[in-house]
Amino acid sequence: EGKAAFSKDESKEPIVEVRTEEEGTPNHDGSNQIEPNETTPLTEPE
């Protein structure tokens, strides 16, 4: 039963991932810039 539920969930996830990836790609780019920026200040004081 556990395996069957996982297979069903995985089938639904790929469909949402494809849609989110296309729409999330541009949004992710902006978030990605903030991540490295946060690490930059941490490396400066070090």
Image: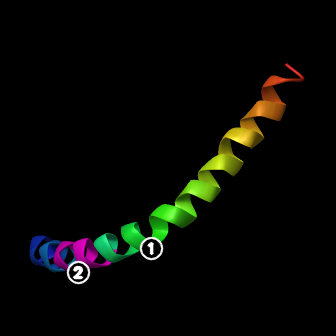
Residue at image position (17%, 79%) is 5
Q: Which residue is mark 1?
A: 23
On the rendered image, what quadrant is the N terminus found in? bottom left
Q: Residue at x 15, y 80 (%)?
A: 8
Compared with residue 26, is residue 2 higher up or lower down, i.e. above or below?
below
Farthest residue, direction top: 46
Q: Is residue 26 above or below residue 38?
A: below
| Residue bearing the label numbered 2 | 12
Q: Position of residue 44 (x, y in %)?
A: 85, 23
Read off the magenta span: 10-16
Counting other residues with Cα less than 10 Å from the Cα at mark 2, is it few (<14), some (14-19), or many (20 or more)? few
CA separation, marks 2 and 1? 17 Å
Pointer 1 local density, CA inside 10 Å: few below 14, some 14–19, many at least 20: few
Picture disc at residue 34: none
The three-letter amino acid code for the residue at tag 2 is Lys
Left or right for 37, reference 25: right
Tell me the element at label 2.
Answer: helix
Q: Is residue 45 left or right of residue 14?
A: right
Residue at 77% from the left image edge and 32% from the top image edge = 40
Quarter holding residue 6: bottom left
Tell me the amino acid under the disc marked 1.
Glu
State the image coordinates of residue 43 (x, y, percent, origin top left). 79, 24
